[in-house]
Image (cartoon, helix red, strand yellow):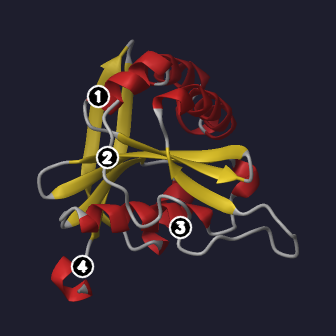
């Protein structure tokens, strides 16, 4: 796997946080290496089976996990330029993301967090870390796809500043279709931050 330049939050989120009233753990976002891919596969299985059957059905969850979340497939995505990050709570991985630099815009391909950690602002901090990294590399926007029926995720992206940018409907095989909205976060001009 190729190495990528570091980014401001490689060692931690902008402000490490712990559960209110608790002494720990601190949540830390780190670059995921190839040896972390089995953790990502395990997290994807857990999170997808908890969240997605009501949205896309169990058969499509099974199909998409088998197609997109093997160690070999993650390795292929990394070789193609995807950058993986793991969110840790102490020594436990609780979430992950992957993004790809593209021409003018960066594309956020994956962002997932175990449901027990929803509501702590961690997703917003993960988004902020990706946006900062993309901005530092000169991208003008960060785009993503979200299932049009995933209302909690759509609300979270809107709160983080993403706006509707179109629709994306794509057959993915075995009679299944990805039926998504495209959302975009415009990044500030980098020279304004200097």
Look at the numbered disc 4 and give the secondary structure of its residue: loop
Label 2 or label 3, whichever comes before in sequence order: 2
Residue 125, numbered circle: 3
Residue 95 position (above or below residue 172): below
Asked whether disc 1 touches disc 3, contact meaning CB atoms under 8 Å apart, the reply is: no
Q: Which residue is mark 1?
A: 79
Q: Residue at x 56, y 61 (%)?
A: 123
Q: In whole angstroms, how far apart are the C-alphas of marks 1 and 4?
A: 29 Å
Q: Quarter holding the C terminus?
A: bottom left
Q: In whole angstroms, how far apart are the C-alphas of marks 1 and 2?
A: 12 Å
Report which quarter residue 161 is drawn in: bottom left
Judged from this view, the residue extending furthest toward the left is: 103
- For the residue carrying disc 1, how many other residues have a C-alpha within 10 Å: few (<14), some (14-19), or many (20+)? few
Label 4 or label 3, whichever comes before in sequence order: 3
> Which is nearer the eye, 38 or 155?
38
- For the residue carrying disc 3, how many other residues have a C-alpha within 10 Å: few (<14), some (14-19), or many (20+)? some
Left or right: 111 in relation to 48:
left
Residue 128, numbered circle: none
Q: Which residue is mark 2?
A: 4
Residue 26 position (above or below residue 78): below
Q: In whole angstroms, how far apart are the C-alphas of marks 2 and 3?
A: 20 Å
Look at the numbered disc 2 and give the secondary structure of its residue: loop
From the top left corner, tell me how far across and down residue 130 is, in percent: 39, 60
Q: Give the label, 1 or 2, closer to the camera.
A: 2
Q: Give the label, 1 or 4, closer to the camera.
A: 1
Label 2 or label 4, whichever comes before in sequence order: 2
Q: Which residue is mark 4?
A: 188
Label 1 or label 3, whichever comes before in sequence order: 1
Look at the numbered disc 3 and give the secondary structure of its residue: helix
Residue 110 seen anywhere in this rendered image of the structure: no
Left or right: 42 in relation to 25:
left
């Amino acid at each position: 796997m190729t190495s990528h330049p570091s980014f401001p939050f490689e060692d931690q989120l902008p402000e490490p946080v712990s559960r209110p009233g608790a002494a720990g753990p601190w949540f830390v976002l780190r670059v995921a290496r190839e040896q972390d891919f089995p953790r990502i596969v395990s997290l994807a299985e857990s999170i997808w089976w908890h969240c997605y059957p009501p949205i896309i059905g169990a058969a499509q969850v099974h199909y998409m996990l088998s197609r997109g979340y093997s160690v070999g497939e993650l390795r292929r995505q990394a070789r193609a330029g995807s950058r993986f990050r793991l969110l840790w709570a102490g020594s436990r991985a609780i979430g992950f993301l992957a993004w790809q630099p593209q021409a003018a815009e960066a594309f956020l391909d994956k962002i997932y967090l175990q449901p027990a950690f929803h509501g702590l602002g961690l997703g917003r901090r993960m988004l902020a870390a990706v946006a900062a990294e993309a901005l530092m590399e000169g991208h003008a926007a960060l785009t993503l796809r979200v299932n049009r029926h995933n209302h909690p995720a759509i609300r979270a992206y809107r709160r983080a500043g993403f706006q509707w940018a179109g629709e994306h409907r794509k057959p993915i095989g075995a009679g299944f279709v990805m039926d998504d909205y495209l959302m975009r976060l415009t990044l500030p001009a980098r020279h304004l931050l200097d």
